Image (cartoon, helix red, strand yellow):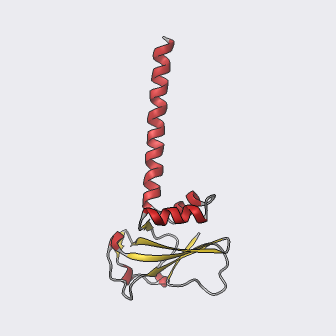
Amino acid sequence: MKIFLHHKPDGYINDCCVVKPISTTWNDFGFKSRVRLELTIANIKVILQAYYTAYLHNEFVTLGSISPNNLDDNIPQYILLESVTEYETLKNRFPNQFNYILKELNDISFLRMQRNRYKNFNLLWLCCIKILKIELS
């Protein structure tokens, strides 16, 4: 999914997310940079409140210093939806694409959950193997 700042280019018809400032200035910092996400998937549009940040040349930049011209797919961008309500809205609107959307948005909360779930699964699997070995011996 393509992420655009400020507005979607004319004629763009694929799934995308447009990041727009909530206030008239983009002077916020880090994950305190409150933004509005206009997410369009399969011609269904949903608006979510979120926090947004990006890194240029491995350095954090403020939203005010980013323009659509210097942002491309190779620049790490991170999003964190503002509240549980926003995640519920996304889940209700796109139940079958919820994980895909969060992964495409590079949502910090989702990425952390996935990483921890994988670790927890591996730990659980190792415990099961040890229990089986003890019972079999």
Query: Relative to 20, is 98 above or below?
Result: above
Q: Residue at x 48, y 43 (%)?
A: 118
Q: Is residue 106 visible?
A: no
Q: Is residue 50 above or below residue 115?
A: below
Where is residue 128? Give x, y as percent. 48, 26
6 up-or-down from 87: above or below: below
**Can you say which quadrant of the picture contains the N terminus?**
bottom right
Horizontal relation, residue 67 to residue 104: left or right: left
| Residue ID at (35%, 76%) | 61
Number of numbered tags placed on the structure image: 0
Tell me if residue 105 can be seen. yes
Q: Is residue 107 left or right of residue 60?
A: right
Give x and y (percent) for residue 19. Answer: 49, 78
The residue positioned 44% from the left and 42% from the top of the image is 119
Image x and y of residue 103, in percent: 53, 60
**Left or right side of 36 for 12:** right
Q: Position of residue 72 (x, y in %)?
A: 51, 75
